[in-house]
Each structure stands twice: as structure tokens, then as C-alpha cells.
């Protein structure tokens, strides 16, 4: 069965941002301590845009099952194994 949608995982995005922030901090701390060419390369690497693959599989279902309306949403990352599930239902009058 195919996914309803593929998206960027919020946990993978958070990790990538933390790595980018750490690289920026490392470049800042090494300013004036490295030859300029090395420092520029380090700074440029820390300023690269984050490009993440869409590893978050999203699936959902909604509809009336017997005497109630149901909504189910699941998300699972194939990279970091992040999982999220939401279920809600309400009786149909």
C-alpha cells in the first residue's frame, strides 16, 4: 500500500538544524585562529541550506465506521524511526 503523503521528518529536521547551529558556533569560535581560507570554508559549510529527503511517511483515514465518525493519522520516519499516531472518533447521531 502506498503512503498518502511523504514529507520531511520534524525530528530529522531538528537534528539537522542543531548540527548546522553547532557548525556555525564552531566557525565563530575559530575566527582568527585558523588561516583565512580554512575559516571561510568552515563558515561556508555552516551556512549551507539544509536539504532533507522526504523520509516521513504519512497515512490517514477518515470516515464513518458503523455508528461513529473516525479519524486516524500516522507518521513514521524511515530514517530516524520517529513515530506519531493520532486517533479521534465521535458518535454519529
Image (tube, grey):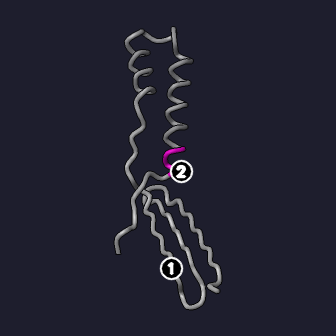
Please state the horizontal and vertical placement of residue 20, each as a whole percent of the image. 49, 33
Q: In the image, which is nearer the foreground, mark 1 or mark 2?
A: 1
Please, which residue is most extreme toward the bottom here? 66
Q: CA distance from mark 1 to mark 2?
A: 29 Å
| Label 1 vs 2, first from the N-terminus | 2
Q: Is residue 20 above or below residue 57?
A: above
Using the image, tell me which numbered label, if any, was put on residue 63: 1
Image quadrant where residue 52 sits? top left
Q: Is residue 75 above or below residue 26?
A: below
The N terminus - image quarter: bottom left
Q: Which residues are magenta?
A: 10-14
Query: In the rendered structure, does residue 11 fall within the stretch colored magenta?
Result: yes
Residue under label 2, please give it: 11
Dominant SS of magenta comes to helix
Please state the horizontal and vertical placement of residue 34, each as a whole percent of the image. 46, 12
The secondary structure type at the circle numbered 1 is: strand
Q: Nearer the viewer, residue 57 or 82?
A: 57
Please, which residue is most extreme toward the front here? 93
- Residue positioned 54% across, 31% down in the render: 21
Mark 1 crowd level (few <14, some 14–19, many ≥20, 10 Å Cα): few
Q: Nearer the viewer, residue 30 or 6?
A: 6
The C terminus - image quarter: bottom right
Mark 2 crowd level (few <14, some 14–19, many ≥20, 10 Å Cα): some
The secondary structure type at the circle numbered 2 is: helix
Amino acid at each position: 500500500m502506498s503512503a498518502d503523503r511523504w514529507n520531511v521528518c520534524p525530528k530529522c529536521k531538528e537534528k539537522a538544524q542543531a548540527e548546522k547551529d553547532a557548525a556555525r558556533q564552531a566557525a565563530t569560535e575559530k575566527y582568527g585562529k585558523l588561516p583565512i581560507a580554512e575559516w571561510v570554508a568552515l563558515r561556508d559549510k555552516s551556512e549551507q541550506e539544509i536539504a532533507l529527503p522526504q523520509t516521513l511517511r504519512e497515512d490517514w483515514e477518515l470516515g464513518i465506521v458503523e455508528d461513529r465518525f473516525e479519524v486516524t493519522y500516522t507518521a513514521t520516519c524511515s530514517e530516524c524511526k520517529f513515530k506519531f499516531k493520532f486517533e479521534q472518533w465521535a458518535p454519529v447521531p
